Amino acid sequence: MFVSPRAAVRRRALVAAGAAAVLALALPACGSSDDNAMPGMHHDASASATHSADPSMSGMPGMDHAGDGNGLAAAKDGYRLTSADSTLTAGRPAAYRFTVTGPDGRPVTRFALDQTKRMHFYAVRSDLTGFRHLHPAMASDGTWTAALPALAPGSWRVFASFTPDSGSGKGEDLVLSRTVTVPGRATDTPLPAATTSTEADGYTVTVTGRPMAGMAHPLTVRITEGGEPVTDLQPYLDTYAHLTAFHEGDAAFAHLHPTTGVDGGHGGPDLSFHAELPASGNWRLFLQFRTGGTMHTAALTLRIS
């Protein structure tokens, strides 16, 4: 039985609620796409990177095969992510339209709020050097539209993360995905080497801790600027940071949450997480945080043994 990373984190967070050492690692209402206007939210982690299609992420329309979990399936527990869009226009913004159908075959129109949103939509390039996190708008018939910025040519995997608010899957966290192609010349870009520190918009993000595959370990993220601790992080999606991870090779998905309490615009410099990534190897982590009304995205490669 597939259990989403978010559901697993929530259960473990409840068990560890009284222990400060146990922490959670790591998109307003239906129809919102506010992140599209946030500076820094939709830039590639490597601005000059292009890529080629990865066979493990490619496929004919409707031919995405179910993985062992971690969002690598177009269908799960009777719910299916469907879309007529298998190709996006290169070099300009595009609207990706999709529907989630339920076990009865009908479009689902009732979704529960998760971190203030009813749908979190992600797009990641096959080489993990491109990343987007959006909150699409839903029409009354259950059709969602994600307003994607211009994407580099190559193969991308798109993920829909949601919780049905009716039907047999009510309350169940689900992550479904499909592949989409952006035409054009594409060059593969090697994943940046594993590291514990990275720079983003003048901020330094440092990760400490030694997570191991399939095991829960504490992990801390520290954010500094010019060598000084940052203490003015602003709330984003009811937390001080949003962390998403993708596994090198298959793009397995992990959506993880910090447990640090929110106290207005006074977050940082340290954010505590409960790290549990299911597979060994390299994971590309994308940390999103906000200061002065501006969204920042920091990316680094974490090696999990």
Image (cartoon, grey):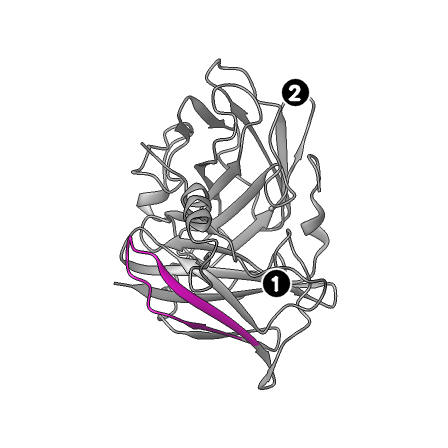
Please indicate, yes or no, whether residue 46 appears anywhere in the rendered image: no
The residue positioned 61% from the left and 56% from the top of the image is: 239
| Front one among 31 and 217 | 217
Quarter occupied by residue 137: top right
Q: Quadrant of the N terminus?
A: top left
Query: Most extreme residue toward the bottom, as rendered?
Result: 227
Span colored in magenta? 205-223
Callout 2 amino acid: Asp
Instruction: Please tell me whether residue 52 belongs to the stretch shown in magenta.
Output: no
Left or right of 84 in this view: 93: right
Q: Quadrant of the C terminus?
A: bottom left
- Determine the secondary structure under disc 2: loop
The residue positioned 50% from the left and 37% from the top of the image is: 87
- Determine the secondary structure under disc 1: strand
**For marks 2 and 1 on the same chain, the one whose residue lies earlier in the sequence:** 2
Instruction: Please tell me whether residue 213 belongs to the stretch shown in magenta.
Output: yes
Q: Nearer the viewer, mark 2 or mark 1?
A: 1
Classed neighbour count for the residue bearing mark 2: other residues with Cα under 10 Å, few (<14), some (14–19), many (≥20):
few
How many numbered marks are there? 2
The residue positioned 47% from the left and 63% from the top of the image is: 20
The residue positioned 36% from the left and 55% from the top of the image is: 276
Classed neighbour count for the residue bearing mark 1: other residues with Cα under 10 Å, few (<14), some (14–19), many (≥20):
many
Callout 1 amino acid: Phe
Badge 2 is on which residue?
141
Say whether marks 2 and 1 touch (CB < 8 Å). Answer: no
Badge 1 is on which residue?
289
Instruction: Say if 225 sits above or below 49 in the image.
Output: below
